[in-house]
């Protein structure tokens, strides 16, 4: 359920994308330093957005480095590191451990078992560093599991639980920015949860797995109106990202603001657009095949 908070690269200037990538590489370095090679496997773009947001909001001076890594062995690249790259690395590990735990518990996948086994000690290290925050996140993760295994749970109730998880992660300090940071994360979390469900709805129905859009999808299919399902989901997603951007715009952001606007107003829609176009192409293929 990660990798949705992306930049729309074609709409960025080269120097803007290089700056964005430097934050991504900074978290990667923090993961390697704190958690080794397996820690680096948890790196995701969602936390890169948070690292940029926190760095800009709190005007934290970055340590800039040039380095090579396994992904860029031939050429040095820029890395921006500060306390927020370390914090986001910690959250990458903690969330990925529980993703593995959830996958193993629900579907007994080998990937889930491998992830939870490899990250268990590392996740305990994060819990020791942030006992109050991780306790709140764990309670919401437990609630999410319960709701996903309960019939007829309203869509918003399930999405709200994942939103609470992201909202807690976005709060870095108990200060005047706390409420707006929570709202940015909360509604972005709901957006991520719903978009993930939209992408996986056919697969989840085929496997008999939980998906909050199952009834909505099947109702549209019964009416032979699949585009109705796409529009219903789009309206929900627009509401979520609208609330998130409203809170975002209230924050005093300067340095990274345009890159983050690219993410919130454009980049987050990349996977939705790709998924919708793939579905449309498949429908057209089936329609042509039935003629």
Image (cartoon, helix red, strand yellow):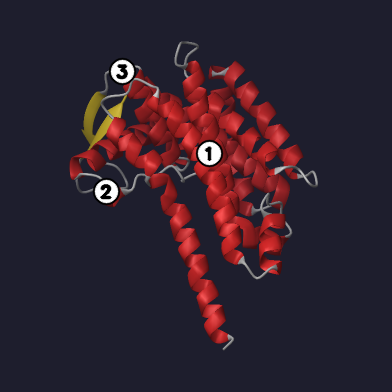
Disc 2 packing (10 Å; few <14; some 14–19; many ≥20)? few
Q: Is residue 290 left or right of residue 84?
A: right
What residue do we see at 76% from left, 43% from top?
A: 153
Q: How many marks?
A: 3
What separation in Å lies between label 3 and label 1 (alpha carbons)?
A: 29 Å
N-terminal of the two: label 3 or label 2? Answer: 2
The residue pinned by badge 2 equals 11
Rendered-image quadrant of the C terminus: bottom right
Residue 148's place in the image compared with 182, above or below, is below
Rendered-image quadrant of the N terminus: top right
Q: Position of residue 60 (x, y in %)?
A: 31, 17
What residue do we see at 58% from left, 33% from top?
A: 163
The residue pinned by badge 1 equals 240
Residue 60: image tag: 3
Regarding mark 1 in the picture, which secondary structure is present there? helix
Q: Are marks 3 and 1 in contact (CB under 8 Å)?
A: no
N-terminal of the two: label 3 or label 1? Answer: 3
Q: Is residue 88 visible?
A: no
Residue 185: image tag: none
Q: Is residue 159 left or right of residue 243?
A: right
What residue do we see at 56% from left, 35% from top?
A: 95
What separation in Å lies between label 3 and label 2 (alpha carbons)?
A: 27 Å
Between label 3 and label 1, give the one nearer the viewer: 1
What residue do we see at 38% from left, 22% from top?
A: 251
**Who is closer to the viewer here, 208 or 212?**
212
Q: Position of residue 250 (x, y in %)?
A: 40, 22
Regarding mark 3 in the picture, which secondary structure is present there? loop
Q: Position of residue 98 (x, y in %)?
A: 62, 37
């Amino acid at each position: 359920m990660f990798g949705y908070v992306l930049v729309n690269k074609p709409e960025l200037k080269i120097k803007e994308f290089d700056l964005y990538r430097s934050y991504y590489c900074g978290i990667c370095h923090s993961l390697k330093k704190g958690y080794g090679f397996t820690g680096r496997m948890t790196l995701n773009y969602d936390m890169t957005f948070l690292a940029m947001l926190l760095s800009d909001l709190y005007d934290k001076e970055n340590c800039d480095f040039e380095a090579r890594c396994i992904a860029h062995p031939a050429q040095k690249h820029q890395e921006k590191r500060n306390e927020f790259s370390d914090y986001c690395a910690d959250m990458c590990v903690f969330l990925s451990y529980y993703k593995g735990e959830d996958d193993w518990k629900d579907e007994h996948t080998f990937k889930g078992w491998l992830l939870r086994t490899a990250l268990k000690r590392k996740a305990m290290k994060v819990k020791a560093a942030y006992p109050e925050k991780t306790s709140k996140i764990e309670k919401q993760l437990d609630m999410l599991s319960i709701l996903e295994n309960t019939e007829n749970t309203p869509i918003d109730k399930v999405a709200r639980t994942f939103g609470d998880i992201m909202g807690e992660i976005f709060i870095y300090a108990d200060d005047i920015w706390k409420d707006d940071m929570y709202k940015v994360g909360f509604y972005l979390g709901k957006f991520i949860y719903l978009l993930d469900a939209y992408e996986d709805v056919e697969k989840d129905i085929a496997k008999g797995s939980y998906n909050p859009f199952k009834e909505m999808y099947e109702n549209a299919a019964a009416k032979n109106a699949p585009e109705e399902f796409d529009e219903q989901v789009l309206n929900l997603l627009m509401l979520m990202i609208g609330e998130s951007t409203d809170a975002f715009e209230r924050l005093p952001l300067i340095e990274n603001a345009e890159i983050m606007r690219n993410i919130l107003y454009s980049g987050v829609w990349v996977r939705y657009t790709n998924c919708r176009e793939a579905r449309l192409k498949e429908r057209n293929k089936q329609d042509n095949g039935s003629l």
